[in-house]
Image: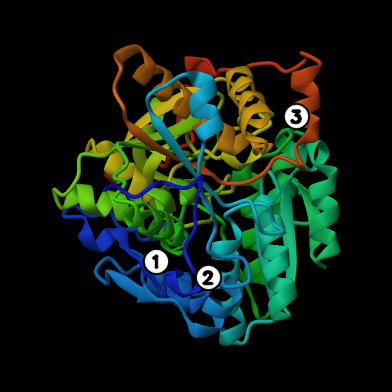
């Protein structure tokens, strides 16, 4: 007899993964290497040590170690809020009248309100072990900034957060929470850095971008003693840390012999999506499954669906190493979309390679449609989702309704990366019907593509 599937598929504390899963080790065709911007040769650990923590660099460059042990001290921290629940959306299934089964991995139950704490805690742990005294970072919607502020407070590290200016204006309570944990928050671009001053000189009224904020954070880290820069998405070691999401989800589903047919995640820089799909994608690469993977991004910042697969800088000031990724160009400034965590010009190299090779699909969604899905989900399932997560909800609903039309009983898993309780400005705009949809024109995108580095690798 088949096991009865509960509404909440919990793991026990002892079932929390003790290793991160490095998907790159199981990829026959690896992502292209990070390049030093001066030499255009693969970056070495020594090249990166001026910016990043040493252990994170080691993980960033590791394409071969399949399982990487989570330090015991960090496992202890994880046990304070993990495992995160995997929930069957039975009320949503009923409301949609679909034969599909819908599950979501809920990462918003910790105080930071999102999945970001998984990597923030890891990076702060390594920084403390290395003997650093402070860190710098950027944040869009504020989820990463909040998580990093929490982690730095726990490990006794100073933190400066450059928050995208338009997001700091839209989400004042995120700013307050970050400062409550003791971090110094600066709206970006600012006049506190050379990069910020240059950006403001060119466009004094800009609302900023994650690329701008990264430029300022990197500059400050490089100029400050015993300080390094930490990033909340895009880079491979961040996806590695987030693999705990997918491993927990897979373990919980395996308990009930559930094999997902479709896995859906929102995509900005790629950390939550990469973490959610990692172990399932490993099975697909090994020929053990035919799972369909769907990345969902905002139509206002369509890195996958309208971007180019090229080497690009991670920041607007062009100071970072070069990553081969799907990108809109480091100079692209997206509209003031309420999903601030998805307003980044590029996508993680692992996901970019998987997309380029046909293992991953991508769709874009316009803002009002996303909030239609968010409000529908909130009314039915009782959780107010973050605008970022709502992109995944929108496509999960689309796929469930497709099952209704065809009669197929597919099992759908999506990532609920965070809650929307600090995003009330966005919900107020939606309720007042003042929310707008901005889709960049081809000319807008060409302006961004013009900022791509003119290097031989981009002409191949």
**Comparing labels 1 and 3, the label whose residue is closer to the camera:** 3
The mark that comes first in sequence, 2 or 1, is 2
Report which residue position mark 3 lands on.
426
Report which residue position mark 1 lands on.
60
User: Which of 22 and 328 lies nearest the eye of the viewer?
Assistant: 22
The mark that comes first in sequence, 3 or 2, is 2
User: Which of 373 and 363 lies nearest the eye of the viewer?
Assistant: 373
**Residue located at (32% from left, 30% from top):** 410
User: Which of 206 and 354 lies nearest the eye of the viewer?
Assistant: 354
**Residue 423: image x %, image y %?**
75, 37
Report crowding for label 3: few under 14, some 14 to 19, many 20 or more residues within 10 A (C-alpha).
Answer: many
Gap in Å between the C-alphas at discs 3 and 2? 34 Å
Q: Which mark is residue 52?
A: 2
- Which image quadrant for residue 148? bottom right
Are dots 1 and 3 in contact, CB under 8 Å? no
Gap in Å between the C-alphas at discs 1 and 3? 35 Å
User: Does 444 appear above or below 296?
Assistant: above
**Residue located at (30% from left, 59% from top):** 23
The mark that comes first in sequence, 1 or 3, is 1
Secondary structure category for the residue under label 1: helix
Q: Is residue 72 visible?
A: yes
**Residue 1: image x %, image y %?**
26, 48
- Which image quadrant for residue 179? bottom right
Specify the farthest residue to the front. 1
């Amino acid at each position: 007899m088949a096991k009865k599937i509960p509404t909440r598929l919990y793991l026990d504390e002892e079932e929390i993964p003790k290793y991160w899963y490095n998907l790159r080790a199981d990829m026959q065709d690896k992502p292209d290497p990070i390049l030093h911007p001066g030499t255009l040769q693969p970056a070495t650990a020594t090249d990166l040590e001026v910016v990043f923590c040493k252990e994170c660099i080691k993980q960033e460059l590791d394409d071969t170690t399949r399982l990487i042990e989570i330090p015991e001290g960090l496992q202890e921290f994880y046990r304070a809020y993990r495992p995160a629940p995997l929930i069957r959306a039975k009320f949503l299934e009923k409301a949609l009248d679909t034969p599909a089964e819908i599950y979501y991995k809920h990462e918003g139950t910790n105080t930071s309100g999102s999945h970001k704490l998984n990597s923030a805690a890891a990076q702060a742990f390594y920084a403390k072990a290395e003997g650093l005294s402070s860190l710098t970072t950027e944040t869009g919607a504020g989820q990463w900034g909040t998580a990093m502020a929490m982690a730095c407070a726990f490990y006794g590290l100073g933190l400066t957060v450059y928050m995208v200016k338009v997001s700091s204006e839209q989400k004042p309570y995120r700013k307050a929470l970050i400062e409550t944990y003791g971090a110094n928050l600066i709206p970006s671009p600012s006049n506190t850095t050379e990069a910020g001053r240059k950006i403001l000189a060119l466009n004094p009224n800009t609302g900023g971008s994650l690329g701008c904020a990264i430029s300022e954070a990197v500059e400050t880290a490089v100029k400050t003693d015993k300080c390094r820069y930490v990033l909340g998405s895009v880079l491979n070691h961040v996806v590695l840390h987030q693999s705990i999401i997918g491993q927990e989800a897979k373990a919980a589903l395996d308990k009930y012999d559930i094999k997902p047919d479709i896995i859906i995640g929102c995509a900005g820089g790629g950390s939550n999506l990469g973490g959610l799909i990692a172990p399932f994608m490993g099975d697909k690469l090994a020929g053990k499954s035919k799972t369909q993977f769907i990345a969902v991004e905002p139509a206002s910042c369509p890195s996958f669906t309208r971007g180019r697969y090229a080497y690009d800088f991670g920041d607007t000031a062009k100071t970072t190493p070069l990553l081969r990724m799907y990108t809109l160009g480091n100079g692209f400034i997206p509209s003031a979309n309420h999903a601030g965590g998805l307003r980044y010009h590029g996508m993680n190299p692992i996901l970019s390679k998987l997309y380029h090779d046909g293992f991953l699909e991508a769709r874009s969604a316009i803002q009002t449609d996303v909030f239609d899905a968010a409000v529908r989900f909130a009314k039915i399932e009782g959780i107010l989702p973050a605008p970022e997560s709502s992109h995944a909800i929108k496509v999960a609903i689309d796929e469930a309704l497709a099952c209704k039309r065809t009669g197929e009983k597919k099992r759908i898993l999506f990532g609920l990366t965070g809650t929307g309780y600090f995003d009330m400005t966005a919900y107020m705009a939606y309720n007042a019907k003042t929310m707008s949809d901005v889709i960049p024109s081809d000319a807008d995108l060409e302006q961004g593509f013009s900022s791509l580095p003119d290097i031989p690798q981009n002409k191949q």
